Amino acid sequence: MKEGFVYILTNKNKTVLYVGATGNLKNRVKEHISGKGSVFTRKYKSYYLVYFEKIAKYEDAFKREKQIKNWKNEWKWNLIKSKNPDLKNLYLDLLE
């Protein structure tokens, strides 16, 4: 069974949030950074990985993505800060 990930990206000024799901987090974030990700992330330069969840089933990651996308931004920020209070770029940790 393939695992999945839900992730949240933000921009340098932390004024926008992008919620996505993937089967390969490291490669997907790399795509966003290189401009091959979504139009939204290119437009708002949302290249900072501030949150992710590893989910056992790939299909469930996309269900979770839809759930989080329907949340108010305040709830999303609360979720992010519960795991990453300093809002550091977690992508750098994936590279290690």
Image (spheres, helix red, strand yellow):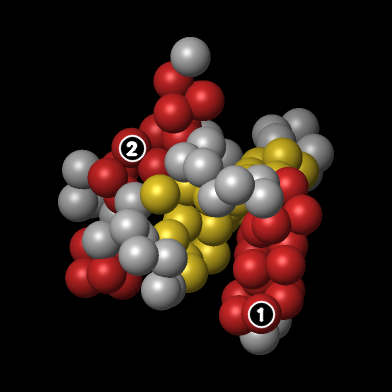
Residue found at the very far front of the displayed protein: 86
Looking at the rendered structure, the kind of residue marked 1 is Glu
Q: Residue shown at 54%/57% (left/top)?
A: 8
CB atoms of marks 2 and 1 within 8 Å: no
Residue 32 is left or right of residue 64, and the answer is left
Nearest the eye: 93 or 81: 81
The answer to whether one can see residue 12 in this image is yes
Residue 25 at x, y percent in the picture = 51, 38
Residue found at the very far top of the displayed protein: 96
Residue 26 at x, y percent in the picture = 46, 32
Specify which label sits upstream in the sequence, 2 or 1. Answer: 2
Nearest the eye: 95 or 65: 95
Nearest the eye: 2 or 10: 10
Q: Which mark is residue 74?
A: 1
Indicate the quadrant where residue 55 lies.
top right
Residue where numbered disc 2 is placed: 30
Looking at the rendered structure, the kind of residue marked 2 is Lys
Q: Residue shown at 48%/14% (left/top)?
A: 96
Indicate the quadrant where residue 72 lies.
bottom right
- Quick one: quadrant of the N terminus? top right
In this view, 14 is above or below 8: below
Residue 48 at x, y percent in the picture = 40, 49
Labels 2, 1: front one: 1
The answer to whether one can see residue 68 in this image is no
